[in-house]
Amino acid sequence: MKSRKTKQQDIILQVIKNDKSHPTIYEIYQKVSEINPKIGQATIYRNINKLVENGEVIRISSSDNMYHYDGECNPHEHFICQKCHRIIDLYENDYQEKVEKIEKKYSIKIEQTTMIYKGICKDCRKML
């Protein structure tokens, strides 16, 4: 059940959607504080959890042992660099086809997916 949207949720959601770097909770807190210093850390944690539960934000567990947040909820996958921990959105044409193939093969209905690839990004590979 979706709860009523608050002004705090709107601000937090806009910060996440406008930040394409997949921010951590601390980075979100810093940006929200610039917009409205009255919004505390506990309010941010509580509202991010609601946004994740409502499917408005994706929580990504990263190799840097931190959660990162993605405001892009259209179907896509992620790549996480094991060196710099950067998260890259991957939009592949066959993504939906893969989901439909699995649904058909196993007679299931997939409502949410999380596909994460891990490796070394091109910037970090240049430094090897």
Image: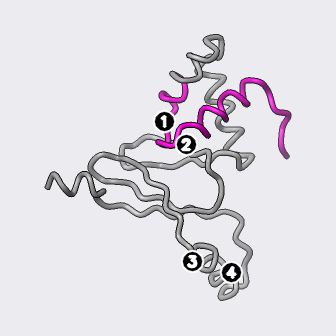
Q: Which residues are magenta?
A: 1-29
Mark 3 neighbour class, 10 Å CA radius: few under 14, some 14 to 19, many 20 or more: few
* Residue 81 rendering spot, x and y as whole percentages: 33, 54
Q: Amino acid at mark 1?
A: Thr
Residue that appears at 59% across and 79% down: 98
Q: CA distance from mark 2 to mark 4?
A: 27 Å
Q: CA distance from mark 1 to mark 4?
A: 32 Å
User: Which circle's residue, 2 or 4, is located before the other in the chain?
Assistant: 2
Instruction: Identify the residue under disc 4.
Output: 103
Instruction: Identify the residue under disc 2.
Output: 69
Instruction: Identify the residue under disc 3.
Output: 94
Q: How many marks?
A: 4
**Element under disc 4:** helix
Q: Does the residue at mark 2 contact the one at mark 1 (Cβ under 8 Å)?
A: yes
User: Which circle's residue, 2 or 1, is located before the other in the chain?
Assistant: 1
Mark 2 neighbour class, 10 Å CA radius: few under 14, some 14 to 19, many 20 or more: many
User: Which circle's residue, 1 or 4, is located before the other in the chain?
Assistant: 1
Residue that appears at 64% across and 15% down: 36
Residue at far left of view: 128
In this rendering, the answer to whether 36 lies above or below 29 is: above
Residue in front for this viewpoint, 66 or 10? 10
User: Which circle's residue, 4 or 3, is located before the other in the chain?
Assistant: 3
Q: CA distance from mark 4 to mark 3?
A: 14 Å
User: Which circle's residue, 1 or 3, is located before the other in the chain?
Assistant: 1
Q: Does the residue at mark 2 contact the one at mark 3 (Cβ under 8 Å)?
A: no
Toward which corner of the image does residue 14 lie, by quadrant?
top right
Q: Amino acid at mark 3?
A: Asp
Q: CA distance from mark 1 to mark 3?
A: 29 Å
Residue in front for this viewpoint, 35 or 63? 35
Q: CA distance from mark 2 to mark 1?
A: 6 Å
Toward which corner of the image does residue 108 lie, by quadrant?
bottom right
